[in-house]
Amino acid sequence: MDLFNSNILPYDGEVNYYGYIMSNEKAHYYFKKLLEDIKWKNDKAIICGKMIITKRKVAWYADKPFEYTYSKTTKKALPWTKELLELKEIVEKHTGETFNSCLLNLYYNGEEGMAWHSDGEKDLKKNGAIGSLSFGADRKFSFKHKNTKQSISIILEKGSLLVMKGETQTHWLHRLPPSKKIITPRINLTFRTILK
Ligand SMILES: O=C(O)CCC(=O)C(=O)O
Ligand SMILES: [Fe+2]
């Protein structure tokens, strides 16, 4: 477990940014492997009562073929790949937490992002840690407190790990803002614990 990381949130939750936890070469290797091997699909979401197909691609892997409801659509998990299991182990070692599932996002360029939300779905373990690994383009990531509206942003670098835990999802929203300057893809993996 790492001793040197501190909470980037001022109150009401805990978010630790570890920075890069693997070499550039390793991060590049995993980026290519994930791009090729993961069964990427366009995401369906229900937003303001309308079914939309996102440009962003997603995939969902887990210990068992869990069903998981996200943005009001239900998906069934695929079995772990070799690389995902390696990455899960790396994240578990760094955080001292365990995870049984992973949601993956592929953003083709900076026009694609993710709107304000919190990861508080009922299938998720309450206050469970979420370990977020990033590959490819460096992107800004922001938090906004639900009541005070205070916001905090950081850059998620390739090969980096961010962990959200405690009451973070209850009190804070997060998003991946779009950016016209980003013209290369990014892959993000969020390791989670699903109850079932
Ligand atoms: O791409 C990211 O860094 C964030 C993804 C995210 O917030 C999510 O999948 O819930
Ligand atoms: Fe999220």
Image (cartoon, grey):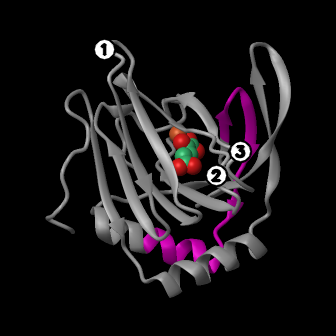
Instruction: Give the residue at x 39% y 33%.
Output: 126
Distance from label 1 to label 2 (Cα)? 30 Å
Q: Give the vertical position of 24 relative to 40 (above or below).
A: below
Instruction: Give the residue at x 32% y 71%.
Output: 93
Is 60 included in the stretch rendered in magenta? Answer: no
**Magenta segment range?**
68-89
Residue type, numbered disc 3: Glu
Of labels 1 and 2, earlier in sequence is: 1
Q: Which mark is residue 113?
A: none
Choose between 77 and 36: the one closer to the eye: 36
Distance from label 3 to label 2 (Cα)? 12 Å
Q: Give the vertical position of 147 relative to 74 (above or below).
A: above
Q: Can residue 22 be spotted in the picture?
A: yes
According to the picture, the residue beneath numbered tag 2 turns out to be 181
Distance from label 1 to label 3 (Cα)? 27 Å
The secondary structure type at the circle numbered 3 is loop
Answer with left or right where residue 5 lies relative to residue 90.
Answer: left
Quadrant in which residue 89 is drawn = bottom left
According to the picture, the residue beneath numbered tag 1 turns out to be 148
Total marks placed? 3
Is 71 included in the stretch rendered in magenta? Answer: yes
